[in-house]
Image (cartoon, rainbow, N blue to C red):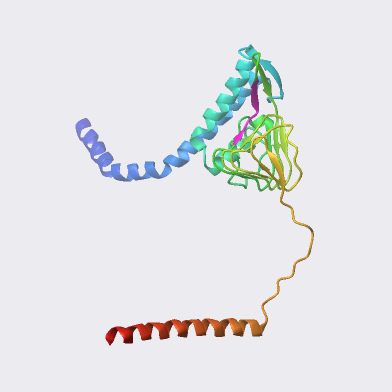
Amino acid sequence: MMFMLISVLVIFAIALLPYTLALFVSVYPILMTIGAIFVAICMLSLRSLLVGGRAKAGWEKVNSKSFLRRQLATSLYHSSLNILDGTVVYHLVSRYIYGAKIDVKSSFIPRLDEPDLTSIGDCVFGANGVLLRNTMFYPGGIVRYGKVDISNHTMILDRAVVSTNTSIKEKVMVAPITAVYDDTIHEEGTVLLGTPALNLTRKTADVEMDITSEPVVSTILICVLSCVQRFQYLFSQIRSVLCYTK
């Protein structure tokens, strides 16, 4: 009796195996996302224990206990979000679990270094390889932790670097392979180019410009000239064919 029952269960499991595999494949991304969110919640508690709440700007000595705790807390943040990198959930977890001040509706937010020390405004575009540095090392074994503030409608292009304790004003475009430091002078709506960054003005004067169409006579003349050119080309082709036949 027991043998028959086990046989029936085995046959039933084999019959449902394709459907079970299909169901597992379909729900696998959802399960991985839920697992990553749970890991992020656990990592948040560990980060709070390591840095005593939220990370703050300041100075540390390399290889000191506080430095190692800070570095471990940052590593926990990045490792918990590796599986979500490049997805919408990455920004949602950074905003609502880790408390980063970012616009979750934007799909082009640069990768964060330290969520507690980074603030990104609305409609910010970050291209490939953009680096936001909340940590800077100095000679003598000194490390500085500082904030990075990026205002609304800012565009940061490929391989640009925003250094520690730096604020970028609204509507600024950072050119590719450009380094922006805390002492970089710029105004709203300018372009920063190079290292050290040059402040290039790109705002036009507030002058109203009207869009006007071409006069009818000018349009007719352009059409006539175009037709004449086409007929000249056609006649030249006919003449060359006649000469070749002779």
Image quadrant of residue 71? top right
Tell me if I can see residue 53 in this picture.
no
Q: Position of residue 53 (x, y in %)?
A: 68, 23
Q: Nearer the viewer, residue 164 or 84?
A: 164
Image quadrant of residue 101? top right
- Residue at x 65% of width, y 16% of height: 139
Q: Is residue 54 above or below residue 171?
A: above
Which image quarter holds the N terminus?
top left
Asked if the stretch drawn in magenta spans residue 205, the answer is no
- Residue at x 55% of width, y 44% of height: 88
As drawn, which residue projects farthest toward the top?
64
Image quadrant of residue 137? top right
Q: Position of residue 124 (x, y in %)?
A: 65, 45
- Residue at x 60% of width, y 16% of height: 68
In the image, taking residue 5 as reference, residue 234 lies left or right, namely: right
Which image quarter holds the C terminus?
bottom left
What secondary structure prevails in the magenta region? strand
Q: Is residue 208 above or below residue 98?
A: below
Asked if the stretch drawn in magenta spans residue 135, the answer is yes
* Magenta region, residue range: 131-137
Q: Position of residue 50 (x, y in %)?
A: 63, 19
